[in-house]
Image: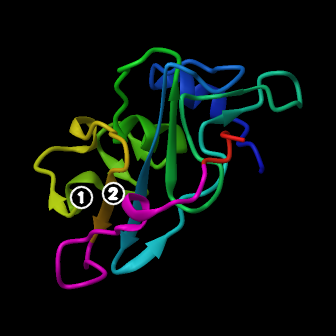
């Protein structure tokens, strides 16, 4: 997994700590699908991992990805700690302030949580266990409300749980 050179700055910039290991107070997963004009955009592996030890992978945000499946791992030190979709998008580098997401004006995006359209911006979408989130810009990929049941029905083990 390639680390982005400015990942540590982005993680800290959204108010998240860089942990040496996954947090043990809270551990759950949410799933994100992202679409631009009906086409899927991959959520890359390695979001939230930072190179903090001069060339060695040394830390991770409590909110991160391990692979390109769209699964967002939430592993915090404090039980009940809350994280938002906006924090994840900012640490990925695709949300600039509240103005643009991936270069498109934020007002052109729709956020769906478990198939229901959210009325607020990504700052108001708090991540919860087994949540299915779709971030859609332009044409939706299908005529009904975006919803992907993959995480709710998944039996795949988490890579951190051995």
Residue 125, above or below 1: above
Residue 53, above or below 136: above
Q: Is residue 3 magenta?
A: no
Q: Which residue is mark 2?
A: 132
Residue extending furthest top?
Answer: 78
Q: Which span is picked out in magenta?
A: 138-157
C-alpha gap between disc 1 and disc 2: 5 Å
Quadrant hosting residue 35:
bottom left
Q: Position of residue 78 (x, y in %)?
A: 45, 14
- Which of the marked residues, 1 or 2, is nearer the chain's N terminus? 1
Quadrant hosting residue 23:
top right
Disc 2 packing (10 Å; few <14; some 14–19; many ≥20):
many
How many marks overall? 2
- Residues at circles 1 and 2 in contact by the CB criterion of under 8 Å: yes
- Which residue is at a point 46% across and 19% down the rendered structure image? 15
Q: Position of residue 51 (x, y in %)?
A: 77, 30
- Which residue is at a point 37% across and 72% down the rendered structure image? 36
Q: Is residue 145 magenta?
A: yes
Residue 51, above or below 17: below
Predominant SS along the magenta part: loop
Q: Which residue is mark 1?
A: 114
Q: Position of residue 39 (x, y in %)?
A: 42, 80
Q: Please identify the quadrant where the C terminus is shown.
A: top right
User: Element under label 1?
Assistant: loop
Could you say which disc has been placed on residue 93 in the image?
A: none
Quadrant hosting residue 115:
bottom left
- Which residue is at a point 81% across and 32% down the rendered structure image? 57
With 121 as the anchor, is 94 left or right in this view? Answer: right
- Which residue is at a point 18% across and 85% down the rendered structure image? 143
């Amino acid at each position: 997994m390639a680390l982005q050179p400015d990942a540590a700055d982005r993680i800290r910039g959204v108010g998240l700590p860089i942990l040496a290991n996954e947090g043990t107070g809270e551990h759950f997963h949410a799933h994100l699908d992202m679409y631009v004009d009906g086409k899927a955009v991959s959520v890359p592996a390695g979001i939230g991992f930072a190179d903090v030890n001069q060339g060695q992978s040394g830390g991770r945000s409590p909110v991160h990805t391990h692979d390109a499946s769209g699964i967002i791992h939430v592993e915090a030190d404090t039980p009940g700690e809350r994280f938002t979709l906006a924090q994840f998008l900012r640490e990925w580098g695709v949300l600039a302030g509240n103005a643009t997401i991936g270069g498109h004006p934020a007002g052109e995006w729709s956020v769906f949580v478990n198939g229901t359209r959210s009325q607020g911006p990504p700052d108001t979408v708090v991540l919860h266990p087994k949540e299915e989130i779709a971030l859609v810009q332009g044409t939706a990929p299908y005529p009904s409300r975006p919803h992907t049941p993959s995480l709710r029905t998944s039996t795949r083990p988490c890579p951190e749980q051995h």
